[in-house]
């Protein structure tokens, strides 16, 4: 924060909020301005918090959520009052569902007009509470610094998640002197420092010993790596655990890259075998939710022993594993490595379990490569995905951040695209949220400025946030958006004959879009580069040119509308 002498004689609530955010360490904010927060965005930028202006609050919210995951610092989302705050709930709830830190800040109606039907009036505290760890309102300008620091700290405490700060319009217009502002910010910072001592390991000693012993005695151990491990920056200690013990590992979708996908102990291509036959599973930073079949038969063995590592004690209580280790994933695995070092063990590559995983992986990879090696035109999903994979791998390190969104597109991409570095895959996440793509792209571009960002989008997923291509161009971000265009949700009209009845049978199917839509023209309309591709040669050329340019681009890949499956791999739920 600027010294007292650099502050103006008078500071209003908007300026004070910007100064407090900067003093708390915020560096980026995403949002949509308007009454009453336009000045707050400008004042924050003047204080050193870069404001990324979006076309829609939902996309801005998804950007803030992804920023929290990528940086470990709270993503900031700024919205106007009423409907703006409601739109912001998408990002707030998404962040909380995925355990990513986010602070939603919204303006609200003047306090003295509350209850009278004021402009965009809404009880925003009540609206945000179901999705927020903390929801607070500044009732006077003097509250702002304290609540900024308090809310930011709450987003990262325990299990990360979303918090909400409400600043009424009358509070934004209140003023105080520069010296008063400096004193309030200093006091808030001091109180935050006093409260932010590192958490003590909660009774880990006995649990660490028990976990090490279970792994040591296991015949078929498995390490499951979740996105919580990626968030915790646990890649070095988890790779050390895998390398020193020889235990196969299975990443969740956004846990990919914590240990490189090309590591010989990766069980990704032998997932069913790994979870179905393991006798001890060390689950690090992943919840036993639908993504992991709840840890229940028939996908898992009824006799499997779970060791859960989670930052949240409530999660341990819910799942009731044989061993629960509450704490930061990096710290817990460090302690586990230390315990194992005292009595080391390592499964040889010839160990029956490792051998079984390795053989199954090899068999499945060969089967997939047999499909990938074919150049199928009109494109199926495999041919363009292979070409994209090879182009991304050719970029080397630092690896591009891959944003993956869609049904078939995301499912095929998860199997084909390779992540060898942590936090280089962003997808629909715990909630299976569609519409995250372009917001994620902006977040990745500003959070990881040294990396290219490549979005591999289904045309339906792209459509949720497609207008943000203008945002990419406006800020000249190094983002290449690849749209798998198969004419609609899952691939256009999939109706059965018995569904083609009634007075509206001639309407387009609920899953259909305009055939061969010219999505690349949207990017060109704003001054970016657009490509229309239908052959392997055209796709390779577009990827080479756009990756080299590192400028906003959309590559419109025409896909056979009958190449995919309804709902991707989630058919049974539709």
Image (cartoon, rainbow, N blue to C red):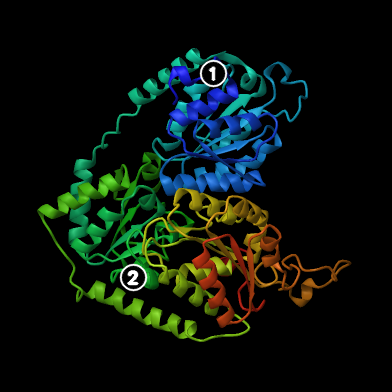
Task: Specify few, some or many for label 2: CA neighbours under 10 Å numbering under 14, 14-19, or 20 or more.
Answer: few
Which residue occupies the extreme front position in the image? 5
Residue 438, how many percent across, how many down? 59, 55
Read off the residue under disc 2. Answer: 262
Drawn side of residue 263 relative to residue 80, left or right: left
The C terminus lies in quadrant? bottom right
Identify which residue is drawn at 47% across, 67% down: 414
Q: Earlier in the sequence, mark 2 or mark 1?
A: 1
Q: 10 Å neighbourhood of mark 1: few (<14), some, or many (≥20)?
A: few
Does the image show residue 381? no
Q: Which quarter of the image is occupied by the N terminus?
A: top left
Q: Residue 518, relative to residue 331: is it above or below?
A: below
Residue at the image position 51 percent from the left and 30 percent from the top: 47
Instruction: Compute the Cα span from label 2 to label 1.
Output: 56 Å
Per the image, the residue denoted by label 1 is 8
Quarter location, residue 516:
bottom right
In x, y percent, where is residue 406? 59, 63
Q: Secondary structure under badge 1?
A: loop
| On screen, residue 140 above or below 510 | above
């Amino acid at each position: 924060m600027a010294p007292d002498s650099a502050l103006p004689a008078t500071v209003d609530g908007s300026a004070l909020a910007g100064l407090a955010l900067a003093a708390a360490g915020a560096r980026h904010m995403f949002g949509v301005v308007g009454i009453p927060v336009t000045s707050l965005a400008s004042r924050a930028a003047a204080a050193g918090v870069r404001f990324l202006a979006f076309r829609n609050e939902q996309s801005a919210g998804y950007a803030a959520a992804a920023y929290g995951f990528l940086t470990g610092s709270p993503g900031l989302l700024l919205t106007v009052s009423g409907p703006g705050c409601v739109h912001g709930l998408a990002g707030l709830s998404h962040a909380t569902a995925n355990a990513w830190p986010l602070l939603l800040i919204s303006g609200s109606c003047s306090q003295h007009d509350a209850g009278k039907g004021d402009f965009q009036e809404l009880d925003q505290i009540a609206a945000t509470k179901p999705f927020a760890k903390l929801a607070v309102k500044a009732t006077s300008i003097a509250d702002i610094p304290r609540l900024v620091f308090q809310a930011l700290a709450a987003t990262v405490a325990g299990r990360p998640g979303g918090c909400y700060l409400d600043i009424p319009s009358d509070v934004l217009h209140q003023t105080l002197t520069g010296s008063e502002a400096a004193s309030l910010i200093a006091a808030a910072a001091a109180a935050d420092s006093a409260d932010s001592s590192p958490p003590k390991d909660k009774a880990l000693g006995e649990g660490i010993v028990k976990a090490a012993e279970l792994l040591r005695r296991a015949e078929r151990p498995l390490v499951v790596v979740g996105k919580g491990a990626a968030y915790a920056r646990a890649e070095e200690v988890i790779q050390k655990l895998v390398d020193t013990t020889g235990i196969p590992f299975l990443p969740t979708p956004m846990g990919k890259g914590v240990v490189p996908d090309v590591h010989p102990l990766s069980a990704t291509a032998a997932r069913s075998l790994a979870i179905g036959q393991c006798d001890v599973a060390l689950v690090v930073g992943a919840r036993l939710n639908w993504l992991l079949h709840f840890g229940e038969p028939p996908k898992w063995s009824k006799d499997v022993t779970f060791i859960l590592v989670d930052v949240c004690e409530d999660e341990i209580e819910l799942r009731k594993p044989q061993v629960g280790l509450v704490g930061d994933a990096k710290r817990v695995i460090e302690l586990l490595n230390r315990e194992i070092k005292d009595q080391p063990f390592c499964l040889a590559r010839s160990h029956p379990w490792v051998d079984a995983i390795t053989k199954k992986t090899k068999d499945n990879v060969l089967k997939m490569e047999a499909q990938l090696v074919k150049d199928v035109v009109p494109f199926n999903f495999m041919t363009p995905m292979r070409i994209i994979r090879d182009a991304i791998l050719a970029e080397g390190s630092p690896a591009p951040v891959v944003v993956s969104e869609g049904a078939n597109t995301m499912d095929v991409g998860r199997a084909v695209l390779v992540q060898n570095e942590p936090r280089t895959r962003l997808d629909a996440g715990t909630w299976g949220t569609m519409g995250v793509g372009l917001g994620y792209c902006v977040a990745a571009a500003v959070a990881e400025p040294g990396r290219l960002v490549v979005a591999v989008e289904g045309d339906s997923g792209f459509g949720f946030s497609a207008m943000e291509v203008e945002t990419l161009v406006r800020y000249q971000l190094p983002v290449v958006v690849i749209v798998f265009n198969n004419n609609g949700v899952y691939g256009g009209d999939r109706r059965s004959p018995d569904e083609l009845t009634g007075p509206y049978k001639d309407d387009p199917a609920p899953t259909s879009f305009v055939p061969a839509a010219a999505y690349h023209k949207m990017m060109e309309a704003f001054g970016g580069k657009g490509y229309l591709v239908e052959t392997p040669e055209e796709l390779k050329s577009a990827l080479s040119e756009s990756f080299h340019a590192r400028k906003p681009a959309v590559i419109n890949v025409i896909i056979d509308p009958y190449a995919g499956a309804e709902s991707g791999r989630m058919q049974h739920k539709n």
